Image: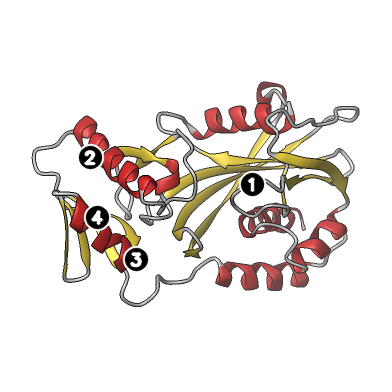
Amino acid sequence: MTADLARLQVLQRRLAARADVAPPAGWLTVRLGQHAIGVTSPEVGRFLAARQARCTVRDGVLQLAADGMDFRTRSALLAEIAQRLHEAGLLAGWRDEPLEVRPLGGGEALATIERAACRTLGIATSAVHMNAFTPQGALWVARRADHKAVDPGLWDNLVGGMVAAGETELQALAREAREEAGLDLAALALQRGGVVLERRPVPEGYLIERVQVFDTEIPAGVVPRNEDGEVAVIECWDAAAVVDEIERDGFTLEAALTTLDALLRRA
């Protein structure tokens, strides 16, 4: 390990503080029936209250009336809301990728919603990231394509992505490993690491995300290759170079914290 422990700890504390920022004053709690599911801006709240009969704003809450609804009908309501936001230009793109909606304090899935609506409505998401080491302790890293809507051109873990509705963490990781690095997860030995938690304002709205960290070792002679076009380049760096780039803010925040989780466990 070439970066000393104190340096890693200071860097982790600095980045963790950036990843934990309360919503702006005056923002609204989003409630689906009796459950708080998100945080959104007053502008989004007013828009939905004016255009969706089941949406009202009162006392700092955007209430989505869901009395008598089951999982399917709650999902249909959220799909209609997401579509209205999309048509009004209030979403950053459209992914056709449903994610599960759970209470902010945790619990069973209540519904699904289009991924692009999650940050606009401050809905919590789950993700997986994998640190990929060489047998010598270097790290495979990937630079995000310039056309990416979020953090274009920044460095990232070799593998990372959202857990889609109906997926387990390992299923999501296997899918992302194949798409982003051309790797068969079943052929790799995995170590479960820590959990990175983020809650912070972002250009699209408010990000709340739980990232489960995994580590693996890529065998000598295996070269990861991107297959989905979302990665500009994949390179292999020694740990010291990765830490230097993290300090320069060259990595996405979640990738930086995910990498530091692994490096601190190895220090």
Q: Which residue is mark 4?
A: 48
Which callout, 3 or 4, points at the residue further toward the start of the chain? Answer: 3
Q: Which residue is rendered at x = 17% and y = 33% of the image?
A: 70
Judge whether residue 259 can be spotted in this image. Answer: yes
Q: Which residue is mark 1?
A: 148
Name the element at disc 1.
loop
Q: Residues within 10 Å of mark 3 (few under 14, many from 20)?
A: many
Q: CA distance from mark 1 to mark 3?
A: 24 Å
Q: Residues within 10 Å of mark 4 (few under 14, many from 20)?
A: many
Badge 3 vs badge 4, beta-carbon distance below 8 Å: no
Q: Position of residue 7 (x, y in %)?
A: 77, 71
Name the element at disc 3.
loop
Which callout, 4 or 2, points at the residue further toward the start of the chain? Answer: 4
> Residue 41 — which label?
3
Q: CA distance from mark 2 to mark 1?
A: 29 Å
State the quadrant of the N terminus.
bottom right
Q: Is residue 36 above or below residue 218?
A: below
Q: Position of residue 89 (x, y in %)?
A: 41, 52
Q: Which residue is mark 2?
A: 77
The amino acid marked with disc number 4 is Leu
Judge whether residue 1 can be spotted in this image. Answer: no
Q: In the rendered image, which quarter is residue 61 located in?
A: bottom left
Which callout, 1 or 4, points at the residue further toward the start of the chain? Answer: 4
User: Which mark is in front, 3 or 4?
Assistant: 4
Q: Is residue 235 left or right of residue 37?
A: right
Q: Is residue 23 above or below residue 38?
A: below
